[in-house]
């Protein structure tokens, strides 16, 4: 049995959920040949905690809001991210700080420090992948660390892994999807008569929305995801600003009612496609789609991606695209991939 020592960078909903899953059942991954020990946590509000023998997760999860790690052995009130990430005891860094759509920081530096130090990285953070994915993948190749980011698109629903593994023998011609749970939830609630603002408040209460929900409603969250899908699935090399983006901010009750009269529903759709000449187009825009459109009936905060391929036609995967446990499961998927990668190295 291999034990991986984890550093959790950012102790918000996602890494808390991962810690909770490990704590609830320490043998959860025994059938896969590994177990996980949390040896370090950093958080902007709580500071840093490093305990090489393993942190008592239930104690940390029960801390009242506003408490720092200062009073703990190995604790400090400041988030010493770089020294924690580079710490000798750490094998895998789970990066789940907030997404910064402008420069990807500080998450991009967290990932870079980890890869430089030869630590494997799993992240759910879209910023570093959409903005610095190529350089970070190159760094991982150089240092032999594994860099995994399944949760950057569709949280735990495995679109990147599906494309990388099961679709490896296909040519992918295009992708189209509902990539933001908040906006899909909001459009559904507006169909039920709520105002955009009230519907956004509900999505925030449900925990789907980004720290700044204008990223969900304005389309920039989907813009990052379309850039990631284009680069990962279509072999493109684009930046988020190459994705022509319109959000749902200007969709009104009248738009929704008029679309319904024509048997249509508004959906915020992200698309990346190559034409016959290989030219890539990448867009995000609200579309009134007919009831028989494959994405018309994707409900609530659910996400979906339709992948257009040469040999299989169109394959659609649908599932959660947000949520604490669902996104923490993406980290687990990545850790399973890291374990397979490590086993292959041993067997070569
Ligand atoms: N705020 C995002 C959504 C969560 O609503 O889909 C994951 O990117």
Image (spheres, rainbow, N blue to C red):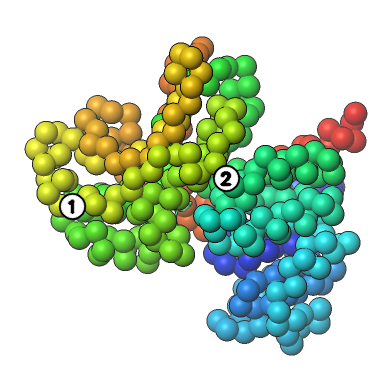
* Residue that numbered label 2 is attached to: 130
Which sits in the foreground, 90 or 36?
90
Identify the secondary structure beneath mark 1: loop
Residue 277: image x %, image y %? 48, 14
Identify the secondary structure beneath mark 2: helix
Q: Residue at x 79, y 72 (%)?
A: 50
Q: Residue at x 24, y 52 (%)?
A: 250
Q: Residue at x 11, y 41 (%)?
A: 258
The answer to which image quadrant residue 163 occupies is top right
Earlier residue among tags 1 and 2: 2
The answer to which image quadrant residue 165 occupies is top right
Q: Is residue 325 visible?
A: no
Residue 288: image x %, image y %? 23, 36
* Residue that numbered label 1 is attached to: 252
Residue 3: image x %, image y %? 83, 53
Q: Is mark 2 within 8 Å of ligand 1?
A: no
């Amino acid at each position: 049995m291999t034990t991986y020592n984890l550093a959790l960078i950012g102790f918000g909903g996602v890494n808390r959920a991962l810690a909770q899953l490990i704590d609830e059942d320490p043998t959860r991954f025994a059938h896969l040949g590994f177990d996980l020990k949390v040896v370090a946590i950093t958080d902007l509000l709580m500071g840093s905690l490093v305990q090489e023998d393993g942190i008592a997760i239930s104690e940390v999860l029960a801390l009242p809001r506003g408490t720092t790690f200062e009073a703990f052995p190995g604790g400090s009130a400041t988030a010493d991210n770089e020294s924690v990430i580079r710490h000798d005891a750490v094998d895998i860094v789970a990066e789940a700080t907030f997404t910064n759509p402008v420069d990807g920081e500080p998450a991009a530096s967290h990932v870079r420090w980890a890869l430089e130090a030869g630590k494997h990285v799993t992240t759910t953070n879209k910023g570093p992948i959409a903005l610095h994915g190529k350089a970070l993948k190159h760094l991982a190749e150089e240092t032999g660390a594994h860099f995994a980011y399944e949760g950057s698109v569709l949280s735990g629903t495995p679109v990147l892994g599906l494309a990388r593994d099961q679709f490896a023998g296909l040519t992918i011609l295009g992708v189209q999807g509902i990539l933001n749970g908040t906006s899909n939830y909001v459009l559904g609630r507006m169909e039920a008569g709520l105002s955009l603002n009230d519907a956004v408040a509900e999505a925030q209460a449900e925990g789907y929305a980004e720290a700044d929900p204008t990223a969900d409603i304005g389309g920039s969250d989907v813009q990052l995801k379309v850039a990631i899908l284009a680069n990962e699935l279509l072999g493109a090399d684009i930046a988020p600003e190459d994705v022509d983006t319109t959000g749902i901010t200007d969709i009104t009750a009248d738009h929704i009612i008029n679309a319904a009269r024509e048997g249509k529903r508004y959906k915020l759709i992200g698309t990346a496609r190559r034409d016959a000449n290989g030219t890539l187009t990448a867009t995000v825009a609200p579309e009134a789609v007919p009831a028989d459109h494959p994405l018309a009936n994707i409900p609530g905060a659910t996400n979906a991606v339709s992948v257009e391929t040469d040999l299989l036609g169109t394959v659609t995967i649908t599932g959660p695209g947000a949520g604490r446990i669902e996104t923490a499961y993406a980290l687990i998927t990545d850790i399973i991939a890291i374990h397979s990668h490590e086993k292959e190295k041993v067997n070569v």
